[in-house]
Amino acid sequence: VQVRILGSAAGGGVPQWNCACRICRGCRDGSLPVRPRSQASAAVSADGRHWFLLHASPDVREQIERCPALHPVSGRRSPIAGVLLGNGDLDACLGLLSLRESQPLTVYTSAAIASGFVEGNRFARTLARFDGQLRWRTLELGAPTVLTVDGEPSGLTVTAFAVPGKQPLHLVGTQPPSDGDTLALCIEEPARGRTLVWAPSVRGPSSTLSELLQRCDCALFDGTFWRDDELGRIAAGAPLARAMGHWPLGGPDGSLQLLAAMPARRILVHVNNTNPVLVEDSAEHALMRALGVELAHDGLEVQI
Ligand SMILES: [Zn+2]
């Protein structure tokens, strides 16, 4: 599996437009070793010619331009064959509306995430201007689905697993919460027996998650927050990390402890601009490295 990290930050990016926290300021003025980052997304391919996006972030247009593998080679035909959605947050799916220039695309996701995007959304009609512009393929939890290019197998399959998470804010009260709201996406290349896990939103531990992380070759994992009360320290009254659907990395019950114990390559994505792990000379960054965990940056290429 070839992987391109298109964006590695949580919603808002690094720096975030309305934020003057220490890290956003240090990133803007260069006083801290913090790289700018766009909102989380990656592209995966078996053959290097046809690609699938893991999430379509609000930064998708710029992310495509920065990644030569995703540039069209002739006419109006992008090498992007489809989009996989692991949750319905705006950071994960708003970019779909920017991919509307009459190219057929297949979107693979759960029924809950698909209805959360389509139901009552007038903007979604811009992706249904002709038959087959956007094809929704429903992922059944735990069952592999072949990713296709023009109806032919692409060499990759995807399996969705429910993980602890939460509904997107804009859907609360509009449809019942479901197991399909927050997914870990397991992308496999059966011909080579290789497996990638994409799990940028995970609220806490689960046996399904541990099992997935034990058997994969590489995990792109939720690195949103270091501490549970991180956001409240800069914005009074802000919710805790877990209430926002993210398992903090630090502390004795933090996700780094689980990641440290797994054999695969582990790379943090969806990192919020408040997270001290972004500061490359911080104690938190050093601890992450000491536990064998990596921090994704925009443009990182991974071969699995
Ligand atoms: Zn900030």
Image (cartoon, helix red, strand yellow):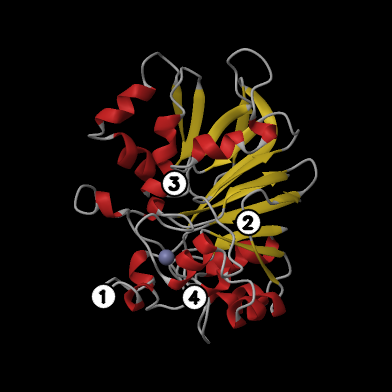
Precedes in sequence: disc 2 or disc 4: 4
* Label 3 near ligand 1 (CB < 8 Å): no
**Residue at position x 47%, y 74% in the image:** 248
Label 4 Cα neighbours within 10 Å, binned few <14 / some 14-19 / many ≥20: many
Which structural element holds mark 3? helix
Percent x, y of residue 135: 45, 25
Label 2 sits on residue: 297
Kindly identify which residue carries mark 3.
92
Residue drawn at point x = 39 percent, y = 31 percent = 97
Give the residue displayed 55% in from the left and 56% down from the top.
Answer: 36
Depth check, mark 3 against mark 1: the one in front is 1
Tell which quarter ligand 1 is in: bottom left
**Could you say which is closer to the camera, residue 159 or residue 275?**
275
The amino acid pointed to by label 2 is His
Determine which residue is flagged by label 4. Answer: 226
Amino acid on which disc 4 is placed? Trp
Distance, label 2 to label 3, CA atoms, is 17 Å
- Residue 245 % position (x, y): 39, 64
| 2 or 4: mark nearer the eye | 2
Residues at marks 4 and 3, CA–CA distance in whole angstroms: 21 Å
Q: Is residue 145 above or below residue 34?
A: above
Report which residue position mark 1 lands on.
236
Q: Secondary structure at mark 4?
A: loop
